[in-house]
Image (cartoon, coloured by chain):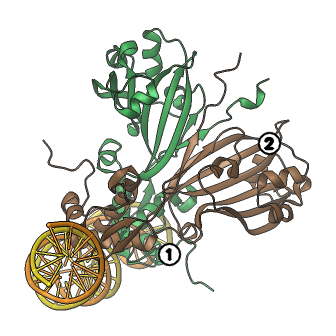
Chain colours: A brown, B green, C yellow, D orange
DNA sequence: TAAATTTGTCTATTGTTCTAGACAATCAAA
DNA sequence: TTTGATTGTCTAGAACAATAGACAAATTTA
């Protein structure tokens, strides 16, 4: 028989208790840790529940306040400030903005940087061009309601999509840019999903707090003829998004 | 101008330096931190590179040795012990064992626990049965070469697949069990991928070290008529596996 | 207003993590 | 065998994390 909570807090693990508690609260907030008004249980209650001192809980709360997830009001209580995870669909034809459009209003995509450079081995293989052939690289950042959602790095065959950066700057959308450059439709050929701790670049770009997790997708998009048109690596803030891998569609054929 | 390494070690972040360094080494080992013989740079060099004391590096190495990633030999050096990430395909018809069969030999699936219980709201909705209707729950663990790869929890409609636990115990495979129970073929309808820090249960089941990351997939499988047959949540050790989301196949229809 | 509830601040103590230095033990190569 | 490079062990102190208790400040409720 265990006296344990369902998820125990680990001591001497190299991760401070306040950080474990902060991470766990962040995770459980969407699952109903707060009441219907977004109010959190009082610090004493949380301390008892996690089996730690009130001050430790306070440190965790301070971190989440700093992060914008919680808001503390003296005498009143602590309240949820943040929003839920957005669902990011991964389907054969999903476009970034379409997928999230129904869930949030303030959706914004930015071009941080762009360059034409010789293709690395990986990018060349994915795009089906020779290693060293000129490719366009786009560094993009997307935000929903002022919170960074994802940070992308995409490569395109410069011979075919030389004007990509220029066009993206106007349209703020890959889909629209492809259309402007004569590619009416495109498809997702493959996506590889991994997860890791956020590194310094992620912390900066996605405004995460240390110890946060990023979901990384590496994808190849192809045109109707199956020719690769885009190779991209995208990093998502794992606490703001979940990837929805939908039905391949193969089940309904025939 | 920064004097920083590309990825900085963060102090006062709530994550101990030795753990940050262990995580980073684990991540960078595949990217060529060790030489061609799998030998790591000496402790003093690593300490200088990370800007910490040699003892701190030693703590990180000790954690990775414990984890089976490294092996230290007095007088000789420290060597890479672990293997690469396995690729786990997510396709409409992927079966667990098929997908990994080519990459490793010692593939094993175990039934840890099973029960018949009333369906929770989520499981009921996914399986298309009434809340509280009897469902079979299977707790499974899969290993490759003696290392735990994933920990799964699946639900099945008890009315249709009452003998699931029994059958799985014999066959060691969901696919084979379905076949034995009269379901020749089935398809993956949807998969939701999230990532989070490993909790106490993950640490135990997947033999991870604290601070490790798990990839969580929640999937619904359906039969040829589109009726749900399995609802499952699977937790993967993020440092041992990567999820490969292949083409949905929708592009070739019509 | 008075009482109860809740967050905010302070001090002190203990345990864990990180640094520092010295030296032993093992291995490989000169 | 001797030397140099490398991992293993020990001690001690500084920096950080967690506990404990007391009380102040703000808000809501009776």
Q: Quadrant of the C terminus of chain A?
A: top right
Residue drawn where x is 37% and y is 66% of the image:
A79
Is B195 in front, or is B97?
A: B195
Q: Give the image location of residue B76, x and y in percent.
A: 41, 62
Examine the rendered structure and indicate whether residue B6 appears above or below residue B153.
Answer: below
Residue B46 in percent (x, y) is at: 46, 71
Residue A187 left/right relative to B62: right
Give the left or right position of residue A241, taking residue A92 as reference: left
Q: Secondary structure at mark 1?
A: helix
Label 2 chain ID: A
| Image height of A162 relative to C30, above or below | above
Mark 2 or mark 1: which is in front?
A: 2
Residue A99 as seen in the image, left or right of residue B209: right
Q: Residue at x 42, y 16 (%)?
A: B177
Q: Nearer the viewer, residue B84 or A172?
A: A172
| The label number, if any, that marks residue B49 in the structure image | 1
Q: Residue at x 52, y 11 (%)?
A: B184
Residue density around tag 1, few if under 14, some if 14–19, many if 20 or more, within 10 Å: few
- Front residue of this view, candidates B226 and B230: B226
Horizontal and vertical percent position of residue A107: 66, 60
Whole-percent x and y of residue B146? 38, 37
Q: What residue did someone put label 2 on?
A: A186
Residue A140 shows in this picture: yes
Instruction: Tell me which corner region of the image, top left, top right, bottom left or bottom right, holds residue B2.
Output: bottom right
Label disc, if present, on residue A22 of the rendered structure: none
Picture quadrant where residue B3 is located: bottom right
Residue B143 versus residue A147 in the image, above or below = above
* Dot 2 alpha-carbon crowd within 10 angstroms: few under 14, some 14 to 19, many 20 or more: many
- Quadrant (top left, top right, bottom left, bottom right) of the N terminus of chain A: top left
């Amino acid at each position: 028989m265990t006296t344990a909570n369902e998820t125990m807090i680990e001591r001497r693990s190299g991760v401070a208790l306040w950080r474990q508690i902060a991470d766990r609260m962040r995770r459980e907030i969407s699952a109903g840790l707060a009441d219907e008004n977004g109010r959190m249980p009082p610090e004493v209650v949380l301390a008892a529940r996690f089996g730690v001192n009130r001050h430790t809980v306070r440190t965790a709360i301070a971190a989440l306040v700093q992060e914008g997830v919680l808001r503390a009001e003296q005498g009143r209580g602590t309240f949820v400030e943040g929003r839920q995870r957005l669902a990011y669909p991964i389907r054969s034809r999903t476009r970034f903005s379409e997928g999230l459009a129904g869930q949030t209003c303030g959706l914004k995509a930015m071009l941080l940087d762009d360059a034409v450079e010789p293709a690395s081995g990986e990018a060349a293989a994915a795009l089906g061009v020779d290693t060293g052939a000129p490719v366009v690289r786009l560094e993009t950042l997307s935000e929903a309601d002022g919170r960074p959602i994802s940070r992308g790095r995409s490569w395109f065959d410069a011979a075919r999509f030389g004007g990509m950066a220029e066009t993206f700057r106007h349209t703020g959308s890959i889909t629209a840019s492809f259309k402007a450059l004569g590619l009416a439709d495109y498809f997702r050929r493959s996506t590889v999903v991994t997860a890791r701790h956020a590194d310094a670049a992620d912390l900066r770009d996605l405004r995460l707090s240390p110890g946060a997790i990023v979901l990384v997708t590496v994808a190849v998009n192809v045109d109707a003829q199956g020719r690769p048109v885009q190779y991209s690596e995208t990093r998502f803030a794992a606490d703001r998004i979940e990837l929805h891998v939908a039905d391949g569609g193969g089940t309904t054929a025939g």
